[in-house]
Image (cartoon, rainbow, N blue to C red):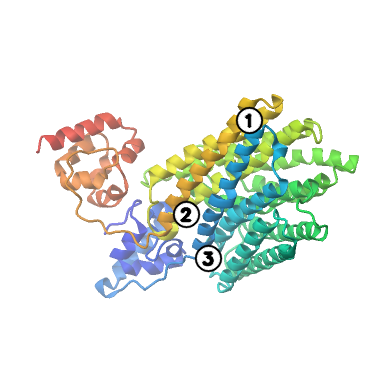
Amino acid sequence: MEINRNTIIKDLIESHPETLAVFKKYNLVIAGGVRGPNEPIAFFAKAHEVDYDTLVKELNEAIEKGGGEHVEIPKLEEDKIYEKFVKTAIVLTLTVGVTFGAIILSYIAIKLNFNSIYYALIQAHGHAQLFGWVGLCVMGFALYIVPRVKNAELKHRNLANLCYGLIITGISLRTILQPIPFHAIRFLLPISAICEIISICLFAFIIFSTIFSSKEKIGIFDKFFKAGIIWFLISMFINFGMIWYIYKHAIYEIPKAVFSPFVHLYLFGFVFMFIFAINIRTVFAFLDIKPVREKAVNLTFWVMNISVPIYFVTHMFANKSIVALRLSQFIVFPMAFAIITFIYGLRIFERSTKELHDVVMDRSYAKTIRTAYIWLIVTTVILLIIPFLGHGSELQRRFHGSLNHAVTVGFITMMIIGYASKMIPTFKGIDMYSLKLSNITFILLNTGCFLRVFSQILVGTSGGNPIFYATMGTSGWFELAALGVFGYNLWKTMNTTQETKPSVSKKLTEITKDTKVFDVVDQYPETLQIFLDFGFSQMANPVMRNTMGRVASIEMATKMHNVDIDKFLSALNDKIASKK
Protein backbone atom coordinates (compact mmCIF):
# COMPACT_ATOMS: atom_id res chain seq x y z
CA MET A 1 0.00 0.00 0.00
CA GLU A 2 1.56 3.26 -1.16
CA ILE A 3 1.29 6.00 1.45
CA ASN A 4 0.04 9.41 0.36
CA ARG A 5 -1.50 12.44 2.05
CA ASN A 6 -5.02 11.00 1.78
CA THR A 7 -4.15 7.55 3.11
CA ILE A 8 -6.57 6.74 5.92
CA ILE A 9 -4.71 5.82 9.12
CA LYS A 10 -7.10 3.01 9.99
CA ASP A 11 -6.74 1.46 6.53
CA LEU A 12 -2.96 1.67 6.72
CA ILE A 13 -2.85 -0.06 10.10
CA GLU A 14 -5.12 -2.83 8.82
CA SER A 15 -2.90 -3.36 5.78
CA HIS A 16 0.39 -2.92 7.64
CA PRO A 17 0.04 -3.60 11.38
CA GLU A 18 3.76 -2.96 11.80
CA THR A 19 3.05 0.78 11.43
CA LEU A 20 1.22 0.74 14.75
CA ALA A 21 4.47 1.35 16.64
CA VAL A 22 5.14 4.52 14.64
CA PHE A 23 1.67 5.88 15.31
CA LYS A 24 2.01 5.08 18.99
CA LYS A 25 5.26 7.03 19.04
CA TYR A 26 3.43 10.10 17.83
CA ASN A 27 0.35 9.44 19.95
CA LEU A 28 -1.95 9.21 16.92
CA VAL A 29 -3.67 5.85 17.22
CA ILE A 30 -5.26 6.46 20.60
CA ALA A 31 -7.04 9.48 19.13
CA GLY A 32 -9.38 7.20 17.20
CA GLY A 33 -11.20 3.91 17.41
CA VAL A 34 -9.58 0.59 18.22
CA ARG A 35 -7.67 0.53 14.92
CA GLY A 36 -6.97 4.22 14.68
CA PRO A 37 -8.76 7.29 13.36
CA ASN A 38 -10.71 7.36 10.13
CA GLU A 39 -8.80 10.43 8.96
CA PRO A 40 -6.09 11.19 6.35
CA ILE A 41 -2.48 11.06 7.51
CA ALA A 42 -1.74 14.63 6.39
CA PHE A 43 -4.50 16.04 8.58
CA PHE A 44 -3.39 14.18 11.68
CA ALA A 45 0.23 15.13 11.09
CA LYS A 46 -0.76 18.79 11.20
CA ALA A 47 -3.18 18.32 14.10
CA HIS A 48 -0.49 16.64 16.21
CA GLU A 49 2.30 18.95 15.05
CA VAL A 50 4.27 16.12 13.45
CA ASP A 51 6.34 16.69 10.32
CA TYR A 52 4.48 14.88 7.55
CA ASP A 53 7.58 13.83 5.58
CA THR A 54 9.26 12.47 8.71
CA LEU A 55 6.14 10.53 9.64
CA VAL A 56 5.79 8.99 6.18
CA LYS A 57 9.49 8.09 6.09
CA GLU A 58 9.19 6.26 9.41
CA LEU A 59 6.02 4.50 8.29
CA ASN A 60 7.69 3.28 5.10
CA GLU A 61 10.70 2.08 7.07
CA ALA A 62 8.40 0.17 9.43
CA ILE A 63 6.68 -1.44 6.44
CA GLU A 64 10.01 -2.41 4.87
CA LYS A 65 11.28 -3.98 8.07
CA GLY A 66 7.77 -5.26 8.77
CA GLY A 67 6.64 -8.69 9.82
CA GLY A 68 4.20 -9.04 6.99
CA GLU A 69 1.35 -11.38 7.61
CA HIS A 70 2.83 -12.59 10.88
CA VAL A 71 2.31 -9.25 12.60
CA GLU A 72 -1.09 -8.98 14.19
CA ILE A 73 -2.90 -5.88 15.35
CA PRO A 74 -2.95 -5.85 19.14
CA LYS A 75 -6.39 -6.17 20.62
CA LEU A 76 -7.19 -2.65 21.76
CA GLU A 77 -10.24 -1.67 23.74
CA GLU A 78 -12.10 1.39 22.55
CA ASP A 79 -12.07 4.19 25.12
CA LYS A 80 -15.68 5.20 25.79
CA ILE A 81 -15.12 7.22 28.93
CA TYR A 82 -16.80 10.29 27.48
CA GLU A 83 -19.97 8.53 26.28
CA LYS A 84 -22.04 8.41 29.46
CA PHE A 85 -21.30 12.06 30.18
CA VAL A 86 -22.31 13.18 26.67
CA LYS A 87 -25.38 10.93 26.44
CA THR A 88 -26.63 12.10 29.84
CA ALA A 89 -26.05 15.71 28.78
CA ILE A 90 -28.24 15.09 25.72
CA VAL A 91 -31.00 13.55 27.85
CA LEU A 92 -30.94 16.44 30.33
CA THR A 93 -31.03 19.18 27.71
CA LEU A 94 -33.89 17.48 25.85
CA THR A 95 -35.97 17.27 29.05
CA VAL A 96 -35.47 19.79 31.85
CA GLY A 97 -33.11 21.85 29.72
CA VAL A 98 -34.09 23.20 26.33
CA THR A 99 -37.56 21.58 26.35
CA PHE A 100 -38.52 23.22 29.62
CA GLY A 101 -36.91 26.45 28.41
CA ALA A 102 -39.07 26.43 25.26
CA ILE A 103 -42.20 25.97 27.39
CA ILE A 104 -41.18 28.84 29.69
CA LEU A 105 -40.56 31.14 26.72
CA SER A 106 -43.92 30.30 25.17
CA TYR A 107 -45.68 30.99 28.47
CA ILE A 108 -43.91 34.36 28.81
CA ALA A 109 -44.94 35.21 25.23
CA ILE A 110 -48.58 34.37 25.94
CA LYS A 111 -48.62 36.42 29.14
CA LEU A 112 -46.53 39.24 27.60
CA ASN A 113 -44.65 39.35 30.89
CA PHE A 114 -41.20 38.07 31.86
CA ASN A 115 -42.18 38.12 35.52
CA SER A 116 -45.08 35.70 34.99
CA ILE A 117 -42.83 32.67 35.61
CA TYR A 118 -41.93 31.39 39.06
CA TYR A 119 -38.24 32.35 39.20
CA ALA A 120 -37.18 29.22 41.12
CA LEU A 121 -38.25 27.19 38.07
CA ILE A 122 -36.03 29.32 35.84
CA GLN A 123 -33.09 28.84 38.20
CA ALA A 124 -33.63 25.07 38.32
CA HIS A 125 -33.83 25.01 34.52
CA GLY A 126 -30.67 27.13 34.35
CA HIS A 127 -28.81 24.76 36.64
CA ALA A 128 -29.78 21.78 34.47
CA GLN A 129 -28.49 23.59 31.39
CA LEU A 130 -25.30 24.97 32.93
CA PHE A 131 -24.22 21.85 34.81
CA GLY A 132 -26.20 19.14 33.04
CA TRP A 133 -25.71 20.13 29.41
CA VAL A 134 -22.60 22.32 29.34
CA GLY A 135 -20.82 20.91 32.39
CA LEU A 136 -21.26 17.23 31.52
CA CYS A 137 -20.17 17.78 27.90
CA VAL A 138 -17.02 19.61 29.00
CA MET A 139 -16.23 16.97 31.64
CA GLY A 140 -16.74 14.07 29.24
CA PHE A 141 -14.62 15.59 26.50
CA ALA A 142 -11.92 16.65 28.97
CA LEU A 143 -11.54 13.11 30.34
CA TYR A 144 -10.89 11.87 26.81
CA ILE A 145 -9.02 14.78 25.23
CA VAL A 146 -6.65 15.92 27.99
CA PRO A 147 -4.71 12.61 28.09
CA ARG A 148 -4.38 12.73 24.29
CA VAL A 149 -3.08 16.29 24.04
CA LYS A 150 -0.72 15.66 26.96
CA ASN A 151 0.39 12.23 25.65
CA ALA A 152 -0.31 10.59 29.00
CA GLU A 153 -2.53 7.92 30.48
CA LEU A 154 -5.68 9.14 32.21
CA LYS A 155 -4.85 8.91 35.91
CA HIS A 156 -7.27 7.45 38.46
CA ARG A 157 -9.66 6.35 35.74
CA ASN A 158 -11.63 4.30 38.26
CA LEU A 159 -12.77 7.53 39.94
CA ALA A 160 -14.50 8.76 36.76
CA ASN A 161 -17.59 6.60 37.41
CA LEU A 162 -17.90 7.93 40.97
CA CYS A 163 -17.45 11.44 39.62
CA TYR A 164 -20.25 10.82 37.11
CA GLY A 165 -22.63 9.28 39.67
CA LEU A 166 -22.21 12.15 42.12
CA ILE A 167 -22.68 14.94 39.56
CA ILE A 168 -25.85 13.28 38.19
CA THR A 169 -27.21 12.84 41.71
CA GLY A 170 -26.50 16.46 42.54
CA ILE A 171 -28.01 17.87 39.35
CA SER A 172 -31.13 15.70 39.66
CA LEU A 173 -31.77 16.61 43.30
CA ARG A 174 -31.19 20.32 42.70
CA THR A 175 -33.40 20.52 39.60
CA ILE A 176 -36.28 18.70 41.28
CA LEU A 177 -36.07 20.11 44.80
CA GLN A 178 -35.40 23.83 44.42
CA PRO A 179 -38.87 24.81 43.07
CA ILE A 180 -41.08 22.43 45.08
CA PRO A 181 -42.60 23.38 48.49
CA PHE A 182 -42.15 20.03 50.29
CA HIS A 183 -40.23 21.13 53.38
CA ALA A 184 -39.79 17.58 54.69
CA ILE A 185 -37.27 16.78 51.96
CA ARG A 186 -35.62 20.21 51.62
CA PHE A 187 -32.63 18.87 53.59
CA LEU A 188 -31.66 17.09 50.36
CA LEU A 189 -31.03 20.44 48.69
CA PRO A 190 -27.65 21.16 50.37
CA ILE A 191 -26.80 17.46 49.90
CA SER A 192 -27.20 18.01 46.15
CA ALA A 193 -24.60 20.77 46.27
CA ILE A 194 -22.26 18.60 48.36
CA CYS A 195 -22.53 15.80 45.79
CA GLU A 196 -21.60 18.27 43.06
CA ILE A 197 -18.63 19.62 45.02
CA ILE A 198 -17.24 16.12 45.66
CA SER A 199 -17.75 15.22 42.01
CA ILE A 200 -15.88 18.27 40.72
CA CYS A 201 -13.10 17.78 43.27
CA LEU A 202 -12.66 14.24 41.93
CA PHE A 203 -12.74 15.55 38.36
CA ALA A 204 -10.11 18.17 39.20
CA PHE A 205 -7.95 15.52 40.88
CA ILE A 206 -8.15 13.25 37.81
CA ILE A 207 -7.36 16.02 35.30
CA PHE A 208 -4.60 17.66 37.36
CA SER A 209 -2.98 14.27 38.03
CA THR A 210 -3.03 13.51 34.30
CA ILE A 211 -1.59 16.89 33.30
CA PHE A 212 1.19 16.78 35.89
CA SER A 213 2.10 13.18 34.98
CA SER A 214 2.80 14.19 31.38
CA LYS A 215 6.38 14.40 30.12
CA GLU A 216 5.31 16.61 27.22
CA LYS A 217 6.52 20.20 27.20
CA ILE A 218 4.05 22.66 28.69
CA GLY A 219 1.92 24.16 25.95
CA ILE A 220 0.31 27.57 25.83
CA PHE A 221 -3.08 25.88 26.29
CA ASP A 222 -2.06 24.19 29.58
CA LYS A 223 -2.71 27.20 31.76
CA PHE A 224 -6.19 27.58 30.26
CA PHE A 225 -7.01 23.99 31.28
CA LYS A 226 -5.69 24.58 34.79
CA ALA A 227 -7.50 27.89 35.20
CA GLY A 228 -10.72 26.31 33.94
CA ILE A 229 -10.55 23.61 36.60
CA ILE A 230 -9.90 26.18 39.34
CA TRP A 231 -12.91 28.24 38.21
CA PHE A 232 -15.01 25.07 38.12
CA LEU A 233 -14.10 24.39 41.75
CA ILE A 234 -14.76 27.99 42.78
CA SER A 235 -18.15 27.85 41.02
CA MET A 236 -19.14 24.74 42.93
CA PHE A 237 -18.32 26.24 46.32
CA ILE A 238 -20.24 29.42 45.47
CA ASN A 239 -23.11 27.21 44.34
CA PHE A 240 -23.06 25.46 47.70
CA GLY A 241 -23.16 28.84 49.45
CA MET A 242 -26.21 29.91 47.43
CA ILE A 243 -28.03 26.65 48.13
CA TRP A 244 -27.20 26.77 51.83
CA TYR A 245 -28.56 30.32 51.96
CA ILE A 246 -31.98 29.45 50.50
CA TYR A 247 -32.16 26.31 52.65
CA LYS A 248 -31.42 28.15 55.92
CA HIS A 249 -33.83 30.98 55.06
CA ALA A 250 -36.55 28.56 53.86
CA ILE A 251 -36.87 30.35 50.52
CA TYR A 252 -36.90 29.05 46.97
CA GLU A 253 -35.21 31.69 44.87
CA ILE A 254 -31.52 32.52 44.97
CA PRO A 255 -31.26 36.33 45.06
CA LYS A 256 -30.76 37.62 41.52
CA ALA A 257 -27.96 39.91 42.70
CA VAL A 258 -25.89 36.75 43.39
CA PHE A 259 -27.27 34.25 40.89
CA SER A 260 -26.78 36.40 37.78
CA PRO A 261 -23.06 37.21 38.34
CA PHE A 262 -22.53 33.58 39.41
CA VAL A 263 -23.77 32.40 36.00
CA HIS A 264 -21.28 34.69 34.28
CA LEU A 265 -18.42 33.59 36.55
CA TYR A 266 -19.19 29.98 35.61
CA LEU A 267 -19.37 30.78 31.89
CA PHE A 268 -16.52 33.29 31.50
CA GLY A 269 -14.31 31.46 33.97
CA PHE A 270 -14.74 27.70 33.72
CA VAL A 271 -16.40 27.17 30.33
CA PHE A 272 -14.46 29.79 28.35
CA MET A 273 -11.13 28.58 29.71
CA PHE A 274 -11.82 25.00 28.61
CA ILE A 275 -13.15 25.98 25.19
CA PHE A 276 -10.23 28.35 24.62
CA ALA A 277 -7.74 25.63 25.63
CA ILE A 278 -9.15 23.13 23.14
CA ASN A 279 -9.37 25.80 20.44
CA ILE A 280 -5.73 26.79 20.90
CA ARG A 281 -4.65 23.18 20.56
CA THR A 282 -6.83 22.14 17.61
CA VAL A 283 -8.38 24.95 15.57
CA PHE A 284 -5.29 25.63 13.45
CA ALA A 285 -5.52 22.08 12.09
CA PHE A 286 -9.30 21.80 12.01
CA LEU A 287 -9.62 24.96 9.91
CA ASP A 288 -6.24 24.66 8.16
CA ILE A 289 -5.05 28.06 9.36
CA LYS A 290 -1.82 29.34 10.93
CA PRO A 291 -0.97 28.54 14.57
CA VAL A 292 -2.20 30.98 17.22
CA ARG A 293 -0.56 34.30 17.99
CA GLU A 294 0.83 33.40 21.39
CA LYS A 295 1.23 36.94 22.75
CA ALA A 296 -2.42 37.76 22.05
CA VAL A 297 -3.64 34.49 23.55
CA ASN A 298 -1.50 34.99 26.68
CA LEU A 299 -2.85 38.52 27.07
CA THR A 300 -6.40 37.17 26.91
CA PHE A 301 -5.61 34.66 29.63
CA TRP A 302 -4.39 37.23 32.15
CA VAL A 303 -6.95 39.94 31.41
CA MET A 304 -9.83 37.47 31.52
CA ASN A 305 -8.77 35.79 34.75
CA ILE A 306 -8.24 39.11 36.50
CA SER A 307 -11.53 40.55 35.22
CA VAL A 308 -13.85 37.62 36.04
CA PRO A 309 -13.60 37.81 39.87
CA ILE A 310 -13.90 41.63 39.75
CA TYR A 311 -16.98 41.26 37.53
CA PHE A 312 -18.53 38.79 39.98
CA VAL A 313 -17.92 40.81 43.15
CA THR A 314 -18.84 44.23 41.74
CA HIS A 315 -22.08 43.01 40.16
CA MET A 316 -23.05 41.31 43.41
CA PHE A 317 -22.77 44.60 45.34
CA ALA A 318 -23.81 47.00 42.56
CA ASN A 319 -27.16 47.69 44.24
CA LYS A 320 -25.52 48.59 47.54
CA SER A 321 -22.51 50.68 46.55
CA ILE A 322 -21.99 53.33 43.90
CA VAL A 323 -18.30 52.37 43.72
CA ALA A 324 -19.22 48.74 43.03
CA LEU A 325 -21.75 49.88 40.43
CA ARG A 326 -19.22 51.99 38.55
CA LEU A 327 -16.63 49.21 38.68
CA SER A 328 -19.22 46.69 37.43
CA GLN A 329 -19.90 48.98 34.47
CA PHE A 330 -16.21 49.52 33.75
CA ILE A 331 -15.03 45.89 34.02
CA VAL A 332 -16.96 44.79 30.92
CA PHE A 333 -14.50 46.74 28.76
CA PRO A 334 -11.36 44.75 29.64
CA MET A 335 -13.44 41.55 29.37
CA ALA A 336 -14.58 42.53 25.88
CA PHE A 337 -11.01 43.47 25.00
CA ALA A 338 -9.82 40.02 26.14
CA ILE A 339 -12.42 38.23 23.99
CA ILE A 340 -11.63 40.24 20.85
CA THR A 341 -7.90 39.76 21.48
CA PHE A 342 -8.42 36.01 21.72
CA ILE A 343 -10.35 35.91 18.44
CA TYR A 344 -7.51 37.85 16.82
CA GLY A 345 -4.92 35.54 18.37
CA LEU A 346 -6.77 32.39 17.31
CA ARG A 347 -6.92 33.60 13.66
CA ILE A 348 -10.38 32.04 13.42
CA PHE A 349 -11.49 34.18 10.47
CA GLU A 350 -8.22 34.20 8.56
CA ARG A 351 -7.78 32.52 5.21
CA SER A 352 -6.67 28.92 4.98
CA THR A 353 -2.97 28.19 4.59
CA LYS A 354 -3.94 25.62 1.91
CA GLU A 355 -1.58 23.13 3.56
CA LEU A 356 -4.41 20.60 3.53
CA HIS A 357 -6.14 21.72 0.33
CA ASP A 358 -5.49 18.34 -1.30
CA VAL A 359 -6.75 16.35 1.69
CA VAL A 360 -10.24 14.90 1.21
CA MET A 361 -12.29 14.83 4.40
CA ASP A 362 -15.53 16.11 5.84
CA ARG A 363 -15.12 19.69 7.03
CA SER A 364 -18.77 20.50 7.69
CA TYR A 365 -17.87 21.23 11.32
CA ALA A 366 -15.81 24.27 10.24
CA LYS A 367 -18.83 26.51 9.63
CA THR A 368 -20.21 25.63 13.07
CA ILE A 369 -16.99 26.57 14.85
CA ARG A 370 -16.67 29.85 12.94
CA THR A 371 -20.34 30.68 13.50
CA ALA A 372 -19.85 30.11 17.23
CA TYR A 373 -17.28 32.91 17.17
CA ILE A 374 -19.67 35.19 15.31
CA TRP A 375 -22.07 34.66 18.22
CA LEU A 376 -19.24 35.39 20.64
CA ILE A 377 -18.74 38.73 18.87
CA VAL A 378 -22.50 39.40 19.21
CA THR A 379 -22.16 38.54 22.91
CA THR A 380 -19.30 41.01 23.27
CA VAL A 381 -21.23 43.83 21.59
CA ILE A 382 -24.22 43.29 23.89
CA LEU A 383 -21.87 43.15 26.89
CA LEU A 384 -20.50 46.59 25.95
CA ILE A 385 -23.98 48.11 25.47
CA ILE A 386 -25.48 46.96 28.79
CA PRO A 387 -23.68 49.49 31.08
CA PHE A 388 -25.28 52.36 29.13
CA LEU A 389 -28.89 51.19 29.53
CA GLY A 390 -29.61 52.27 33.08
CA HIS A 391 -28.82 50.03 36.03
CA GLY A 392 -31.74 47.75 36.88
CA SER A 393 -33.96 49.09 34.10
CA GLU A 394 -36.36 46.84 32.19
CA LEU A 395 -34.42 47.51 28.98
CA GLN A 396 -31.16 46.43 30.60
CA ARG A 397 -32.76 43.20 31.82
CA ARG A 398 -33.90 42.37 28.29
CA PHE A 399 -30.40 42.96 26.92
CA HIS A 400 -28.99 40.91 29.77
CA GLY A 401 -31.23 37.97 28.83
CA SER A 402 -30.13 38.25 25.21
CA LEU A 403 -26.50 38.28 26.33
CA ASN A 404 -26.99 35.05 28.30
CA HIS A 405 -28.62 33.35 25.35
CA ALA A 406 -26.05 34.52 22.81
CA VAL A 407 -23.23 33.15 24.94
CA THR A 408 -24.84 29.87 26.09
CA VAL A 409 -26.57 28.83 22.87
CA GLY A 410 -24.85 30.89 20.19
CA PHE A 411 -21.27 30.41 21.34
CA ILE A 412 -21.06 27.53 23.81
CA THR A 413 -23.70 25.15 22.43
CA MET A 414 -22.61 25.88 18.85
CA MET A 415 -19.04 25.08 19.87
CA ILE A 416 -20.09 21.85 21.61
CA ILE A 417 -21.96 20.76 18.48
CA GLY A 418 -19.09 21.70 16.15
CA TYR A 419 -16.47 19.86 18.18
CA ALA A 420 -18.67 16.87 18.89
CA SER A 421 -19.37 16.53 15.16
CA LYS A 422 -15.63 16.46 14.47
CA MET A 423 -14.17 14.67 17.45
CA ILE A 424 -16.64 11.93 18.33
CA PRO A 425 -16.45 10.36 14.84
CA THR A 426 -12.68 10.63 15.25
CA PHE A 427 -12.86 9.00 18.70
CA LYS A 428 -14.87 6.17 17.14
CA GLY A 429 -12.77 5.84 14.00
CA ILE A 430 -15.88 6.26 11.81
CA ASP A 431 -17.84 8.96 9.95
CA MET A 432 -20.64 11.01 11.49
CA TYR A 433 -23.92 9.11 11.14
CA SER A 434 -25.52 11.75 8.91
CA LEU A 435 -24.01 14.92 7.45
CA LYS A 436 -27.48 15.94 6.30
CA LEU A 437 -28.74 15.91 9.89
CA SER A 438 -25.68 17.95 10.92
CA ASN A 439 -26.64 20.64 8.41
CA ILE A 440 -30.26 20.64 9.62
CA THR A 441 -29.01 21.07 13.20
CA PHE A 442 -26.88 24.03 12.13
CA ILE A 443 -29.76 25.82 10.38
CA LEU A 444 -32.32 25.21 13.13
CA LEU A 445 -30.04 26.22 15.99
CA ASN A 446 -28.95 29.45 14.34
CA THR A 447 -32.54 30.29 13.44
CA GLY A 448 -33.72 29.75 17.02
CA CYS A 449 -30.80 31.64 18.56
CA PHE A 450 -31.21 34.59 16.17
CA LEU A 451 -34.93 34.83 16.88
CA ARG A 452 -34.41 34.66 20.65
CA VAL A 453 -31.49 37.07 20.97
CA PHE A 454 -32.85 39.84 18.76
CA SER A 455 -36.56 39.50 19.55
CA GLN A 456 -35.81 39.78 23.27
CA ILE A 457 -33.86 42.97 22.60
CA LEU A 458 -36.76 44.27 20.48
CA VAL A 459 -39.21 43.46 23.26
CA GLY A 460 -37.21 45.83 25.45
CA THR A 461 -36.71 48.60 22.90
CA SER A 462 -40.33 48.52 21.66
CA GLY A 463 -41.90 48.66 25.08
CA GLY A 464 -43.24 45.10 24.90
CA ASN A 465 -44.63 44.78 21.38
CA PRO A 466 -46.69 41.51 21.24
CA ILE A 467 -45.21 40.62 17.83
CA PHE A 468 -41.71 40.47 19.31
CA TYR A 469 -43.00 38.50 22.30
CA ALA A 470 -44.58 36.00 19.87
CA THR A 471 -41.37 35.74 17.85
CA MET A 472 -39.39 35.11 21.01
CA GLY A 473 -41.92 32.47 22.09
CA THR A 474 -41.30 30.42 18.94
CA SER A 475 -37.50 30.54 19.17
CA GLY A 476 -37.18 27.83 21.80
CA TRP A 477 -38.94 25.27 19.63
CA PHE A 478 -36.42 25.78 16.82
CA GLU A 479 -33.64 25.16 19.32
CA LEU A 480 -35.39 22.11 20.72
CA ALA A 481 -35.72 20.68 17.20
CA ALA A 482 -32.05 21.44 16.54
CA LEU A 483 -30.82 19.70 19.69
CA GLY A 484 -33.20 16.79 19.11
CA VAL A 485 -31.78 16.22 15.64
CA PHE A 486 -28.24 16.67 16.94
CA GLY A 487 -28.82 14.32 19.87
CA TYR A 488 -30.19 11.61 17.57
CA ASN A 489 -27.32 12.04 15.09
CA LEU A 490 -24.64 11.95 17.77
CA TRP A 491 -26.24 9.07 19.68
CA LYS A 492 -26.36 6.96 16.51
CA THR A 493 -22.70 7.79 15.90
CA MET A 494 -21.67 6.81 19.43
CA ASN A 495 -23.63 3.55 19.21
CA THR A 496 -21.87 2.43 16.04
CA THR A 497 -19.54 -0.32 17.17
CA GLN A 498 -17.49 -0.69 14.02
CA GLU A 499 -17.50 0.56 10.49
CA THR A 500 -18.94 -1.84 7.98
CA LYS A 501 -16.40 -3.07 5.50
CA PRO A 502 -16.96 -1.87 1.96
CA SER A 503 -19.16 -4.38 0.22
CA VAL A 504 -19.89 -4.86 -3.42
CA SER A 505 -21.84 -1.75 -4.25
CA LYS A 506 -25.23 -1.98 -5.81
CA LYS A 507 -24.98 -1.50 -9.54
CA LEU A 508 -25.16 2.20 -10.29
CA THR A 509 -27.87 3.21 -12.71
CA GLU A 510 -27.50 6.94 -12.09
CA ILE A 511 -24.69 8.99 -10.60
CA THR A 512 -25.75 11.67 -8.10
CA LYS A 513 -23.90 14.26 -6.07
CA ASP A 514 -23.77 11.79 -3.13
CA THR A 515 -22.25 8.91 -5.14
CA LYS A 516 -18.73 8.01 -4.03
CA VAL A 517 -15.98 8.65 -6.58
CA PHE A 518 -14.57 5.17 -6.02
CA ASP A 519 -17.88 3.48 -6.89
CA VAL A 520 -18.15 5.38 -10.17
CA VAL A 521 -14.72 4.44 -11.46
CA ASP A 522 -14.86 0.93 -9.99
CA GLN A 523 -18.10 0.06 -11.80
CA TYR A 524 -17.48 2.16 -14.90
CA PRO A 525 -13.71 2.36 -15.57
CA GLU A 526 -14.41 4.28 -18.78
CA THR A 527 -15.48 7.28 -16.65
CA LEU A 528 -11.88 7.75 -15.52
CA GLN A 529 -11.15 9.76 -18.66
CA ILE A 530 -13.99 12.14 -17.81
CA PHE A 531 -12.49 12.75 -14.38
CA LEU A 532 -9.15 13.52 -16.03
CA ASP A 533 -10.78 15.78 -18.65
CA PHE A 534 -12.40 17.84 -15.86
CA GLY A 535 -9.07 18.35 -14.10
CA PHE A 536 -9.04 15.50 -11.56
CA SER A 537 -5.44 14.59 -12.42
CA GLN A 538 -4.87 12.69 -9.15
CA MET A 539 -7.43 10.13 -10.27
CA ALA A 540 -4.78 8.68 -12.58
CA ASN A 541 -3.17 7.27 -9.41
CA PRO A 542 -4.92 4.00 -8.44
CA VAL A 543 -3.90 4.45 -4.80
CA MET A 544 -5.59 7.83 -4.69
CA ARG A 545 -8.74 6.36 -6.22
CA ASN A 546 -8.79 3.64 -3.58
CA THR A 547 -8.22 6.02 -0.65
CA MET A 548 -9.63 9.48 -1.24
CA GLY A 549 -12.14 8.02 -3.72
CA ARG A 550 -13.80 5.97 -0.97
CA VAL A 551 -14.18 9.11 1.17
CA ALA A 552 -15.11 11.74 -1.40
CA SER A 553 -18.55 12.10 -2.89
CA ILE A 554 -19.01 13.68 -6.32
CA GLU A 555 -20.17 16.86 -4.58
CA MET A 556 -17.09 17.03 -2.33
CA ALA A 557 -14.76 16.40 -5.29
CA THR A 558 -16.30 19.12 -7.48
CA LYS A 559 -16.15 21.66 -4.67
CA MET A 560 -12.47 20.93 -4.11
CA HIS A 561 -11.65 21.42 -7.80
CA ASN A 562 -14.14 24.22 -8.48
CA VAL A 563 -15.93 22.15 -11.12
CA ASP A 564 -19.51 22.78 -12.23
CA ILE A 565 -21.32 19.84 -10.63
CA ASP A 566 -24.26 19.84 -13.07
CA LYS A 567 -22.03 19.64 -16.14
CA PHE A 568 -19.86 17.00 -14.51
CA LEU A 569 -22.81 14.81 -13.49
CA SER A 570 -24.29 15.16 -16.97
CA ALA A 571 -21.02 14.00 -18.57
CA LEU A 572 -20.74 11.01 -16.21
CA ASN A 573 -24.35 9.91 -16.66
CA ASP A 574 -24.11 10.27 -20.43
CA LYS A 575 -21.06 8.01 -20.39
CA ILE A 576 -22.66 5.25 -18.29
CA ALA A 577 -25.90 5.53 -20.31
CA SER A 578 -23.95 4.78 -23.48
CA LYS A 579 -22.74 1.53 -21.92
CA LYS A 580 -26.16 0.21 -20.93
Name the quarter where the N terminus is drawn.
bottom left
Q: Amino acid at mark 1?
A: Tyr
Q: Are marks 3 and 2 in contact (CB under 8 Å)?
A: no
Q: Is residue 114 left or right of residue 534?
A: right
- What residue type is disc 3 on? Asn
Mark 1, other Cα within 10 Å: few <14 / some 14–19 / many ≥20: many
Instruction: Name which quarter of the figure residue 221 lies in.
Output: bottom right
Pointer 3 residue: 151
**Which one is closest to the eye, mark 1 or mark 2?**
1
Which badge, 3 or 2, is on the more N-terminal residue?
A: 3
Given residues 416 and 457, the one toward you in this image is 457
Residue 67 appears in the figure: yes
Residue at point 33% right, 69% down? Answer: 18
Quadrant where the C terminus is found in the figure: top left
Mark linked to residue 275: none
Residue 310 percent across, percent down from the top left: 80, 48
Could you say where residue 254 lies in the image, as x and y percent from the top left? 77, 51
Q: For label 3, count other residues whose C-alpha is less than 10 Å away and answer few (under 14), some (14-19) or many (20+).
A: many
Q: Nearer the viewer, mark 3 or mark 2?
A: 2
The residue indicated by pointer 2 is 423
- In front: 416, or 528? 416
Query: Is 564 situated above or below 81?
Result: above
Query: What residue would you read off at disc 1?
Result: 469
Circle 2 crowding by C-alpha within 10 Å: few under 14, some 14–19, many from 20: some
In three-dimensional space, the C-alpha distance between marks 1 and 2, rounded to whole angstroms, equals: 38 Å
Percent coordinates x, y for residue 265 in the rendering: 72, 50
Q: Is residue 555 left or right of residue 248?
A: left
Task: Give the amino acid type for the residue marked by disc 2 in the picture.
Answer: Met
Residue 354 appears anywhere in the view: no
Q: Residue at x 70, y 37 (%)?
A: 114
Residue at position x 33%, y 59% from top? 499
